[in-house]
Structures are given as C-alpha cells and as structure tokens.
Image: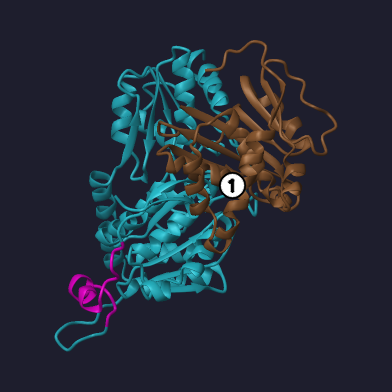
C-alpha cells in the first residue's frame, strides 16, 4: 500500500490539520507517513495545501508532482490539482463556491458537501472531518479506531471534548459522499 | 522502543536538544526554523533539565554566547537559517580557531541575500569550504529525515567534543517543515561540573586551581612559529576526520549503471526518481553523503569504476557537484541538476535530467 494524497483549500479550512490527523491515524495503523505543507506567504490568507503519504515502505520523496488522491476545498485548488491526479485516481471535492466543475474522464470524481454538512452539525470547523469521512468511505486505508487514536494524539487535550463532534462529522461524510463520475479507463494500481 | 510521535523536523530537533543534555540554546528566530525556539519555549527546558534557553538580540550575539558557553566545557547549540548563519560566520571562524566544541544548525532557505523562505541547498559551499576566514573546516552532518533531525543532535555533540571542533547540522526548509514519524531517544543527563572537570578540565575554562596552569582559550597567536604549529594541529584533526568520520548511505548501488549523488531533501527526491527510472529499466542507484565534510571521496572513486555516469542532484546551481568531480577525477561524466529559488524538482524531472545529461549525452 502506497497512497499519495494532496489536500488543498483556503487557509483556515483545516487543510493542514486534516492531513495531520490522517498521518497520525496512519502511524496508529503502523504505516510509514509523511506530511509536507505549503508554508509562507500562501498560508497567510491564500490557499494552503499539504502532501500526505501513507505507505507500507520507507517513504522516498515527501514532495510529489502527481497524486493518487486529491481532496480539494476551493476553485483555485481544483484548477491546480485536477490535472495532477494519476489516471484512475480519485478527486474528491467540496462543491461550495465551485463554478467550474472537474471535467476529466479518466479519474473517479466524488463530491462531498463538507461546508454545508459541517454547518448543519453546528460548526463549520468540522468540514475537514466531513471530508475525511468521505475519503475513508472511498479508500478505507485506516480503520476508524485508529482515526480515533489519531484524533487523541493530534488534538491538544483541551480540545478532546470536541472529538465526539469530529467523529460524528466523519460519519456524516461517509454517508453523504456522492459519486459524480467513475473513471472510464481504470488502470489504477 | 521509545515513544513514536509525528513531528516536524524542527520540532524533533528541538526536543532532541533538551534530551541530549544540552546546557544552553542561544538563538534568534528566522523562517523556516522558528519552530525550534517556539518548541523549546513551550517545552520549558529550564524545568525539565535546567537548560538555558535564551533569545539573543542578534545572531552575532548568539554565536558569541556559544563561544563563551562552549569554552567552559558546556554543551551549547544555536540554530538559524541562511541569512542568520551568514551573520554568524565571524564567530564560527573564531570558535574553530579556538577549538571550542559547539553545534550550529542551519535550516537552509534560498539566497543570496534575504532570498526566499522556501527550501534550498545553496549553503553547501559556506558549510563545507569555510564560510568564515582562515584555514578551517566544520564537520558537517546532513539529515534527510525527521528521525535524523533528532538522532544527529547527540551525534553532533559527540563529534564536537571528540575533535573540539564546531559541528554543523545542515538541514533545509523541507526537512525542517515536514512531519514524519520519529522515535525519540532516552534523555541523556546534563554533565555535572565534576564530569566536565574530569573530562575537559585540561582545556576548558572552569576556574584555575593551584595545582595546574591556567587554561587559555583564544584564536589569536602573534608568533608565526606557534601559529603555524597550531594550523598544522588543526590540519591533523581534519585528516583524522577524513579517516574516521566519513558517513554515507547507498541505495540500490549493487547493480547500478548510473548514480545519483544527493544529500538531505534532494536525496529523498532521488530515491523516488530511482523507483521511476528502474520501472523504465534504467539501473540507477544513489549515494547519499551523510557527512558533507568529510566527504565520501573514496567510495565515489570506487563507484566511478562501476557506473557510467553520475548526476549530482541539489537544490542549488551546482555546489556539491564540484566535490563529486574531484572525487572521481574525471574518470566518468559527472553532471549537475538542480532547481533554485525555493523550487523543488519533481522526481520525474530528475529522471529526465539523468536521461538528457548522462545517458543520452
């Protein structure tokens, strides 16, 4: 197993913490993990992104050009990373604010209305966990019990009372993820 | 097995500083290594081990605090990024001349000047060829993972005290900012004054007792005969390092027909490039220098008899490539590939460069 993921959106949408929780869950699953963020000017008000790799083997480059999965939360990130998904790979996006939808035919495309579902749960802050749920439904590479351990490890103790809400959000994401397009020529590994 | 955590390279370095029994950290914040001091401040080392954590008024002050602390036989360390390390060069030269064991960490960003805050490896010359004035070398360690950001701190102090020479950990923005699994080592207690007196009392300024001469720490000697002797003594140390401290890692070199030479973050990209190239049937391996000074010259010379060409992959315009060329003595083609200004080459680009610059040259 070697899963190469890019997660991208606006700063403040929880992109980096989604990556961190996924990486920590991977550690709990005994996988090798890496997490490399964009840092600097784009973090301060622009788009943020993070490359997360989970693998059975020692991880080589933490920086990549193409990805097995892209999870995107805004138009800029969709425009930038749709072409970077490997043929047969997965593109998961939040349609909130999207005017130009993805067009590729050789990848799996799914939507998750994470912003809307997060708001319905009472906190837009959990939109990243809604997306995590949607992703894990499609690619169950880590068990939910390990995601729980990952949340415990990655959130500071003062935020542990929010774990049940985060896990509820993961459940909502699993339930609400919607297929838009199935890859026509599946040659995924 | 120790505790396994997910940490940034900079955070792992900071935690390792406390665990390595360091007596003093002196520094001044700069991106992309600011997490080091942030982490140290939050971790309260003054309560955990009694370590001094001090934000100096400038990098010049910080390096001279290291001079003073190191001169007493204490373990002292600083970290900074490229422009800050340039400011420290005068102090580093004095420290090398005065033979004080200290550790300096450079989390490199792009230059020259203020440059960029993004990763680069453009300080190779500065780290390995002097940087400050005078005939001297730092012993330079190049971590390529978060684990090594932790492990190299106690190693750097061992080497610094073995040779009474400043050791540099040459990292970069990529290794500093990325998170990976790290297994932390068991804390090493700080040295007691008795320990320092016993092991370093022959040189450190720990207070004169009636039974011995004063220990004098200086880099100044106006008598040419004595100064030349001192220079030759430093040379002997560097020669001993070249004999005993060369460290490197080889990946898939057994059957390699071509070789990447890359350190730090570039070596990670080269590892991925090996997978891509081998999937196309190109037999390429990697030699990763772990010590940049002393450089693995001997092994590269041996590999020059096996492979048809070498590509030095660096986030620079071509610095380490000069040492690779000197090592192989023109026996085979050696070329350089790199991106600069904070750009990071993709593994695909590296494979392409191998084809155009070496295989189909």
Task: Return the residue nearer the eye: B64 or B170.
Answer: B170
The chain under label 1 reads A
Quadrant in the rendering for residue A181: top right
**Which residue: 23% across, 71% down?**
B200
With respect to residue B14, does A32 lie above or below? above
With respect to residue B21, does B109 lie above or below? above
Task: Return the residue nearer the eye: A84 or A26.
Answer: A26
Task: Return the residue nearer the eye: A80 or B204.
Answer: A80
Residue bearing mark 1: A167
Q: Residue furthest bottom?
A: B210
Q: Which chain is brown?
A: A
The reply to whether residue B33 is in sight is yes
- Tell me which segment is drawn in magenta: B187-206
With respect to residue B37, does A182 lie above or below? above
**Which residue: 46% across, 15% down?**
B279
A74 left or right of B172 in image: right
Q: Is residue A104 magenta?
A: no
**Which residue: 61% across, 26% down?**
A66
B174 left or right of B44 in image: right
Q: Which chain is cyan?
A: B
Q: Is residue B201 magenta?
A: yes
Task: Return the residue nearer the eye: B284 or B181.
Answer: B181
Tell me the SS state at disc 1: helix
Quadrant in the rendering for residue A129: top right
A78 left or right of B64 in image: right
Q: Position of residue B323 (x, y in %)?
A: 41, 37
With respect to residue B123, does B60 lie above or below? below
Predominant SS along the magenta part: loop
Q: Residue furthest right?
A: A99
Q: Position of residue B88 (x, y in %)?
A: 50, 63
Q: Position of residue B340 (x, y in %)?
A: 61, 39
Q: Position of residue B106 (x, y in %)?
A: 49, 54
């Amino acid at each position: 197993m070697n899963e190469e993921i890019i997660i991208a959106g606006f700063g403040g949408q929880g992109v980096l913490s989604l990556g961190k929780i996924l990486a920590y869950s991977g550690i709990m699953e005994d996988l090798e993990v890496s997490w490399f963020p964009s840092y600097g000017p784009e973090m301060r008000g622009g788009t943020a992104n993070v490359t997360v790799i989970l693998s059975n083997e020692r991880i080589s480059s933490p920086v990549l050009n193409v990805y097995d999965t892209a999870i995107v939360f805004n138009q800029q990130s969709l425009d930038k990373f749709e072409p970077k998904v490997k043929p047969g790979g997965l593109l998961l996006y939040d349609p909130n604010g999207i005017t130009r939808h993805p067009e590729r035919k050789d990848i799996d495309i799914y939507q998750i209305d994470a912003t809307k579902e997060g708001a319905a749960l009472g906190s837009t802050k959990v939109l990243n966990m809604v997306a995590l749920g949607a992703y894990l439904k499609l690619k169950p590479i880590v068990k939910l019990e390990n995601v729980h351990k990952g949340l415990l490890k990655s959130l500071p103790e003062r935020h542990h009372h929010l774990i049940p809400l985060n896990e509820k959000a993961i459940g909502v994401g699993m339930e609400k993820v919607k297929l838009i397009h199935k890859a026509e020529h599946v040659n995924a590994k | 097995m120790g505790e396994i955590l997910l940490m940034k390279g900079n955070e792992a370095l900071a935690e390792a500083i406390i665990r390595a029994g360091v007596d003093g950290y002196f520094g001044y914040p700069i991106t992309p290594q600011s997490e080091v001091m942030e982490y140290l401040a939050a971790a309260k080392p003054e309560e955990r081990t009694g370590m001094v954590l001090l934000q100096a008024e400038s990098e010049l002050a910080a390096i001279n605090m290291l001079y003073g602390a190191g001169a007493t036989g204490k373990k002292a360390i600083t970290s900074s990024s490229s422009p800050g390390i340039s400011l420290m060069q005068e102090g580093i030269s004095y420290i090398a001349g005065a033979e004080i064991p200290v550790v300096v960490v450079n989390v490199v960003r792009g230059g020259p000047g203020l440059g960029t805050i993004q990763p680069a490896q453009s300080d190779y010359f500065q780290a390995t060829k002097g940087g400050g004035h005078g005939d001297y070398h730092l012993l330079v360690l190049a971590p390529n993972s978060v684990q090594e950001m932790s492990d190299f701190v106690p190693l750097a102090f061992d080497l610094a005290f073995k040779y009474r020479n400043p050791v540099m950990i040459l990292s970069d923005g990529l290794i500093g900012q990325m998170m990976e699994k790290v297994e932390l080592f068991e804390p090493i207690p700080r040295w007691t004054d008795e320990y320092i007196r016993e092991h370093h009392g022959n040189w450190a300024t720990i207070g004169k007792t009636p039974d011995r001469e004063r220990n004098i720490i200086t880099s100044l000697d106006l008598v040419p005969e004595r100064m030349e002797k001192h220079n030759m003594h430093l040379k002997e140390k560097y020669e001993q390092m070249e004999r005993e401290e060369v460290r490197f890692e080889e990946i898939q070199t057994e059957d390699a027909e071509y070789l990447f030479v890359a350190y730090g973050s570039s070596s990670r990209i080269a590892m991925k490039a090996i997978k891509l190239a081998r999937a196309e049937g190109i037999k390429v391996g990697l030699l990763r220098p772990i010590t940049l000074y002393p450089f693995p010259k001997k092994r590269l010379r041996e590999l020059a008899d096996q492979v048809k060409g070498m590509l030095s992959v660096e986030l620079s315009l071509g610095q380490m490539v000069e040492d690779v060329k000197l090592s192989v003595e023109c026996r085979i083609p050696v070329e350089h590939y790199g991106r600069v200004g904070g750009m990071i080459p993709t593994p695909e680009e590296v494979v392409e460069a191998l084809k155009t610059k070496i295989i189909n040259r």
